[in-house]
Image (cartoon, rainbow, N blue to C red):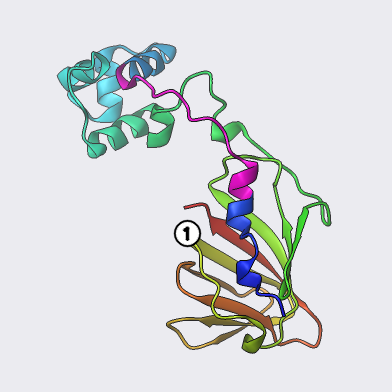
Amino acid sequence: MSDPTSQPSLIRLARASGEEARATPVDLGQRVRELRKARTWTLEQAAQEAGLARSTLSKIENGQMSPTYEALKKLASGLGMSVPQLFTPADTPQAGGRMATSRRGEGTPHLTTTYEHELLADQLTRKSMLPYRARIRARSFEEFDGWIRHEGEEFLYVLTGRVRLFTEFYQPVDMVRGDSAYYDAGMGHNVVSISDDDAEILWVTSMA
């Protein structure tokens, strides 16, 4: 039997399909000034919204100080965005404007000896999450050649049937339709169907 862990992982496949050139570093001070002016705020107004001193915001805009992460969080919150968006060029499409629809059966298939994966939203590159639907073909732990483990965290939701979730550091857990689990994907894990038919689950993996 072939080793499913020796096949290209879904995360590696997703990264390969979404490789893009590195973006040019953003001038934080200029970016903050542009965001403030786009809202027609004075320095005083923006500082009040962010909960920062006016002098601190002025120094940030003029590149005279490197803000702490706490200051960045306050600044981002005051501007109504996330910290990563502060460092995203203005002409770069924001993640909030992206969308992809996957009709049932139209995802990208990826077959292993134990699972039948259907990658969802595969047309989007540089995702922070990898969602996929999986048909669980395996019926016992012995069908795997050891543990499956990879980077990131993982969320599992049972769509049909019954499954048994094996993890490296916990007792096996039997799960039915509607049950879910969230776990560290670097911990060894395997899932088998304990139904008469193949079970189906939704998996969402972080692209750490």
Q: Mainly helix, strand or loop, the magenta region?
A: loop
Q: What residue appears at the point 46 percent right and 81 percent down from the top-left corner?
A: 168
Residue 93 x/y as whole percent? 57, 26
Q: Quadrant of residue 176?
A: bottom right
Q: Amino acid at mark 1?
A: Gly
Number of marks drawn:
1
Q: Is residue 101 visible?
A: yes
Q: Secondary structure at mark 1?
A: loop
Residue drawn at (29%, 33%) of the image: 72
Along the viewing direction, whichever of 192 and 199 lies nearer the viewer: 192
**Residue 97, quarter of the rendered image:** top right
Q: Is residue 79 above or below residue 114?
A: above
Q: Is residue 172 left or right of residue 161?
A: left
22 inside magenta stretch: yes
Would residue 82 be visible to someone looking at this image?
Answer: no
Q: Which residue is mark 1?
A: 152
Q: Which residues are magenta?
A: 14-29
Q: Position of residue 12 (x, y in %)?
A: 58, 53
> Toward the viewer: 179 or 171?
171
